[in-house]
Each structure stands twice: as structure tokens, then as C-alpha cells.
Image: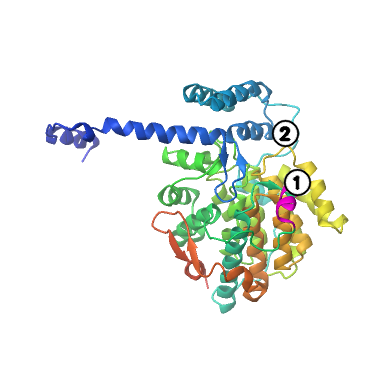
Amino acid sequence: MKAWERAYRLLQEANPVVLDEEEQTWLLMNEVEKSRDVMLKLFWHSNVPGSGAPEGLAVASVQSMHNMGYETSHLEALLDAGEAAYQRDDLQELQRITARLNRELKELPKNEQSPYWNFKYYSKWEEVEQQAKFGTYDKYDVHSDDFAKRIYAGWLAQIVGGALGTAIEGYTSQKLKEKFGDIRYYVRKPNTYNDDITFEIAFLNAFDREGYGVSSAAIAEEWVALVPSGWSAEEIALKNIANGIYPPESGYAHNPFREWIGAQMRGAICGMVAPGNPKEAARLAWTDAIVSHANNGVLGEIFNAVFVSLAFVEQDIRKIVELAVEAIPADSEYYDFVSTTLNWCRQHEDWQETWKLCEEKFKEYNWIHAYPNAMAQIVALWYGNGDFDETLHIIAMVGQDVDCNAAQIVTALGIMNGRDSIDNKWTDPIGDELNTYLRNMKKMTITGLSDWTVNAVRKHSVE
């Protein structure tokens, strides 16, 4: 039936009714208004659900566009006006200012003096493939018991890391030290709610159906099917996809947060489904990342995917870090940050000395940006040197987006060193339950997620 015929039939078959006042859908507009006003205020001021850390996306959007080489100084007055409207709860004026700000963000002039433009902008996988260095290994046996055990240990470790970090994300190393002293355990009773794993499961759902030929479009459709809401880059991508803007445009259109951590935080799953094959892990990471990110934001997911893939075939975590850095194109800005961090790690024995240097280098970036968190990962992995507890201690103490960082790096440690390397003090409070906010997947188990991953990989792997 043609569209006009459907519409015509609907009109012809409609019978007049008289609605009571409470039945009239105009009253629903009050609820819509409240919902939009809440989202507007959260754009200017919010607190992270797990840790209560403060954040303001309005300011962060301007900050991020400055980071990406655009002239933003003329927007400072607009931010001041928005803040004033927020403080006096003038939501009408705040709506006007927010619309004006979003328009300006789309039309920013390029800042030719910005160091951002000294580096190559990567928009195609083939460009990364040509410039990056990927090692090759003998084919890993995904049908072995060893693979299943490593996948379980990896997922278990990831969920532990996320549970530790969720309670402390969004703070500086100094403030965490002042509040908690040395963090060597959960600072509160842990739970398994975490937005990072949500998007990894969406990828897994698409991969389970389509295998290694999974497309960015298929992943994007899993996002809108399964994920009810996101934050920053992911929320913008969800809106883009729902409006028919598919990858790669969904990752950069109207998205000032496209180089934040949102892709980097989900790289582990790509490494898990490509064990011992860092190039394939990187390609899958690219495919997934462009749903919501671009350029350096995409390279962040490649970085995490590669070191998780390598954990199946290497036993020296420092070597894995070095190889993961080599998998990033040397003419990218992302490489500048991770290679500099690696060099500092080689030069200094004390992680705190290295971290002070890192804090100075990334001070212009938001704590949710990819760079501060990639640097945090390298510091924790290098100085933790394969020890699960020490690595978690360091990643907790450096602060930033702790749950994302901890979850990704200890996935590699769990895979590399096995379940026995994870002390029961971390796992006993969690058990096997996994809670998410995914549609129709709100209650899962860690063993079930592990089995699903193993079976999906085996189904699509060639003997």
C-alpha cells in the first residue's frame, strides 16, 4: 500500500469523538515542557550519576571546539549570559541563548594558529591502516577452553574496574587523595550500573548477527534500538541516527564532543572479538567509533581495542602498551599525547612524577576528553606492571574519567593473567549479576555475557 493510500484510509476511517478534558492530549505538553526544561538545565549544569562530580556541557562544548582548532573567544560573553539566565532560572532566555550557542558552534571560524592543525586529520580507515604499525601473530584458537576462560576473566575484570571507578570519576588526583587517601578498594558498596558497557553490548548484538563484516550502520541501529539515552557525544549521535543521519556523519554532525572518551571507553569489546589480531581489532574499533566520534576520538577506541587484542598473545603489559602506541598513526595529535606519556614513563620511576607532567600537558582539556584518560591508562598500566591491584590503585588515584579507564585497562589484565589474578575482594561484592539500562536487557549475568561473547566469536570465525 502506498503512503498516500495509508493516510487516505486513516482519514476515511476516523470517527469523531468528544474527549473529556483529562483525555485531551494538549495536557501532555506540560510534561513535554518539564522534560525539555530539565534537559536544558542539565546542559548547563549537571552532576555525574555515579560520583556526583560537577560538569557543564555548555562550557565544555566551547572548550572542546577550542581544542579542535576553532576560534571561540567570542563565545565567552554568550556563556556569561547563559550562566546569568541559569542562575535566575529564566528558562525562556536560557532557551534562546542555548539555541544561539549551538548555532555559533556550527559556524566557528578556524584558528590558524592552533596546534591542532599541525597534525593529520584522519577520516578514513584506509588512512590509518596505511600509517599505523600492527604486529602479526599466529591465529588464536577461539574454540579452545583457554579463550572462554580469558573472555570471562576479561569481562569480570572490566566490571570490577567500572564499579570502582564509577564512584570517583570526575575529580583530580589531589582532591581524591585529600578525600580518600590511598584508594585500594571500593570507596562505597559497588554496583554494576555503567554506561560504558551499554555501548559495548550494542556492538556485540550487531556483531552476533553480522560477524566481522558488521557495518557502522548496523551498530548505529542497535544504538537506537537498545540505548534509551546517552551523554555528550553519544546523546548527540543517538539523536542524529534517530533523525536518519547515519555514520560517519552521525559521529561529527553537530557534535562538539566528537573527540571525547565515548569511543575510547568501548574499545575493549573489539579487542575481545579479535583476539591476537590487533589490526582487525583496530578496524572493528574504527567501524564502531565513527557512530559517535571522529578523528582523535576514533583513534582512542583503536588504542584500547589493540591493547586488549594483544593481551591474548603477549605476556608483558609494558610491551603491550608500546605496541598499542605504535598502532596509532605517528602524525596524529592523539599519538603526540600517548607517545609523550610513554616516554615520560620510561624516564621516571615514580608514577606521581610522571602524572604531574601529564596534568600540565592536558590542562586545557575536559576530564571527559580522550587525551587525559589515555594518558591515565598508560601511566597506570606502565607502573602497575601487570599487577591487578596496583594498576587499579594508580588508575583510581590519577582521577579523570576513572570508570572508563579502569574498565578498559583491567580487561587486558584479566585476559592476560586469568581469573586467578583477580582477588576475590573485588568480585565477591559484585557476584554474577549485571545491571544495565538497555531495553530488554536490564538484568543480565556476567557469565551470560561472557558465554554470549564466546559463542558469537566462534560462530563467525573460520576454522
Q: Secondary structure at mark 2?
A: helix
Question: Horizontal placement of 9 versus 268: left or right?
Answer: left
The alpha-carbon separation of the residues under discs 2 and 1 comes to: 15 Å
Residue 259 sits in quarter: top right
Q: In the figure, 343 relative to 444: above or below?
A: above
Q: Considering the whole magenta stretch, tell me its main secondary structure.
A: helix
Magenta region, residue range? 174-181
The x, y position of residue 55, in whole percent, is: 61, 39
The earlier-in-sequence mark between 2 and 1 is 2
Residue 378 sits in quarter: bottom right
Question: Horizontal placement of 85 versus 304: left or right?
Answer: left
Q: In the figure, 72 relative to 370: above or below?
A: above
Question: Horizontal placement of 317 versus 406: left or right?
Answer: right
Question: Horizontal placement of 409 versus 454: left or right?
Answer: right
- Report which residue position mark 2 lands on: 117
Look at label 2 and name its amino acid: Trp
The x, y position of residue 120, in whole percent, is: 71, 39
The x, y position of residue 438, in whole percent, is: 44, 54
The residue carrying pointer 1 sits among few (fewer than 14), some (14 to 19) or many (20 or more) residues within 10 Å by Cα, namely some
Q: In the figure, 202 relative to 10: above or below?
A: below
Which is more foreground, mark 2 or mark 1?
1
In magenta segment, residue 180: yes
In magenta segment, residue 401: no
The image's mark for residue 337 is 1
Identify which residue, 54 or 432, lies in the foreground: 54
Q: Quadrant of the N terminus?
A: top left
